[in-house]
Amino acid sequence: MKHTKEQIDTAIAKSKEIIREAFSEFAIDDMAITWTGGKDSGLALWLIRQVCQEDGTQLPKVMTIDEFDTFDEIHAFMEKYAEEWALSLDWRRNDDVIQAAGAELNAKIMVKDLNDRNQAELKRINYELNAFPFEAESYVGNHLMKTVVFNMYLEEKNVKAVFQGLRRDEQAARVQDDYFEKKEAAHLIPEHVRVKPILQFTERLLWDTYELYKIPYCVLYEQGYRSLGAKTTSAIAEAGVAAWNQDLENTVERAGRRQDKEKMMERLRGLGYM
């Protein structure tokens, strides 16, 4: 059942309240926005832009992580709106790992061929083998291609608060999330606060918001994808049926994602995964 405009605007008002609270606590230069090109981070970015336009505030810098195993459609979508919205978009990836793999998915990477930071990160997750296959959605791959890149960005840019497009109903590991989550400094993890302004949105409410306010989205959602991750491990949920026309209430949103990753989400998040 579709949500009413009043219900949508109530959810939007809550998100804007959280965004404004973050702006009141942190300087613009100390904040960043994570954007993946997916529907959740897209809604969060749109809401932050709305607040900035309403309040005459500068938009914080925006970062994205290229995990190498990516959809061309996502890249095209992000490039289009980064230009149209005049975003200060910083593309980041772990080139050391990509080079060690010869830029080939599933190639064997020898640990000894990685730089000191990546070897230290493998020790941090207690990885003891001398090699691993290059894939973005494995435990090792997620850590090196996403979490490490994210933490290195925070370190380099001295980011104190980062906006993330996460929803409570998307993944069991996020059900207890708060709008503000402080991450204490730890080995290879800089102290920072994670701001999650769309936690209260459900998948249906999100798409109803997209429709009402004509928010742009990646064309892959029209093809039947509901959740986008790595290209080779993301599957269409219902071919030819747009995400918002599927049975969102009685089916699993992330069923098209690699399931061993879904099962280890708590472990990944303990390492700083988004």
Image (cartoon, grey):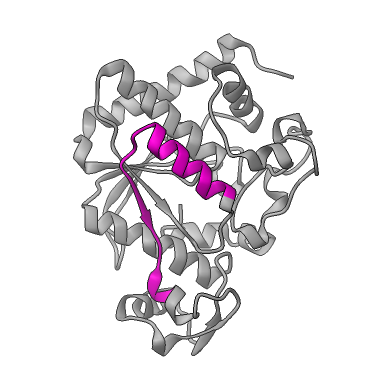
Q: Horizontal and vertical percent for residue 51?
A: 35, 22
On the rendered image, what quadrant is the N terminus found in?
top right
Majority secondary structure in the magenta region: helix
Work out whether 43 lies above or below 98. Answer: above
Segment tinted magenta in the rendering: 73-97
Where is residue 213, by image quadrant? top right
Find the residue positioned furthest to the top.
Answer: 6
Q: From this viewpoint, is residue 167 visible?
A: no
Q: Horizontal and vertical percent for residue 274?
A: 46, 52
- Name the foreground residue: 97 vs 167: 97
Question: Is 159 placed left or right of 39 in the picture?
Answer: left
Q: Horizontal and vertical percent for residue 178?
A: 44, 37
Q: Residue at x 64, y 46 (%)?
A: 227
Magenta stretch containing residue 78, yes or no? yes
Q: Residue at x 58, y 39 (%)?
A: 218
- Name the foreground residue: 157 vs 191: 157
Question: Is 253 placed left or right of 230 in the picture?
Answer: right
- Name the foreground residue: 11 vs 48: 48
Q: Residue at x 38, y 22 (%)?
A: 50
